[in-house]
Image (cartoon, helix red, strand yellow):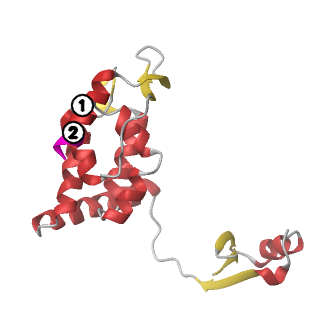
Amino acid sequence: MKIYLVRLKNTNVRWFDNDSDLTNFFINAPERLDSYQVTILNAEVDTKITGDKLFDAIQEQSNLDRKLNVVLGNEYVDKVEKLIQLYEQFCKRTPWDKTKMTTNAQKVYEKLTTTTPEEKQFYKLMSSSCQRYLLYSVSDSVEWYEAMLDVYPKIKGLAETCEIEYVDPVTRGTSWRGGRTPVKMVKNFEKAKKIK
């Protein structure tokens, strides 16, 4: 089976798994054809697996890698492991079942547990949209902010306003409630920053 990866100026534009779709793309291409680079791959099916099983395997492998690195004395991975453990303890739970995380909390947890525990990778994660959730919707404790600053010391401070996740116990819907950042949150963040 052939797969065609079409690139334009070092960015992936599309991929195609048959000649006719590739031809149609070139017929309607917005750029000159000589500006596209096409990589042709001969692919064989290695394994067929459902998405949930593959995701669980990736998460399990990442968990084992983190634990192995902690045992080997990797300080940064130890800090990441502590952050994940605190996240499991503090993250938002659904009002109707306190054993389950909210949908947004589960998504952030999955990102934390599948990201390679290296500074460069975690810096990307922490500077993405996850940062808003981690700063404002998990916990306002000094311990939580210390763990975040251990993993990502580039956080300068909390914003004057923030959005916090709200889960309606009746409708079970999730919304973001904006407003002034709570004073307790700001004070505890500043305490954690002084400790660090």
Q: What's the residue type where badge 2 is placed?
A: Ala
**Mark 2: few, some, or many residues within 10 Å (few <14, many ≥20)?**
many
Q: Which residue is mark 2?
A: 192
- Mark 2 in CB contact with mark 1 (< 8 angstroms): yes
- Magenta segment: 192-196
Number of numbered discs: 2
Q: What's the residue type where badge 1 is placed?
A: Asn
Q: Position of residue 174 (x, y in %)?
A: 48, 26
Q: Quadrant of residue 16?
A: bottom right
Residue 173 visible somewhere in the drawing: no
189 left or right, relative to 4: left
Q: Secondary structure at mark 2?
A: helix
- Mark 2 to mark 1: distance in Å? 6 Å
Residue 136 visible somewhere in the drawing: yes
Instruction: Please tell me the numbered disc located at residue 188.
Output: 1
Q: Nearer the viewer, residue 50 or 79?
A: 79
Q: Residue furthest front?
A: 194
Residue 96: in magenta span: no
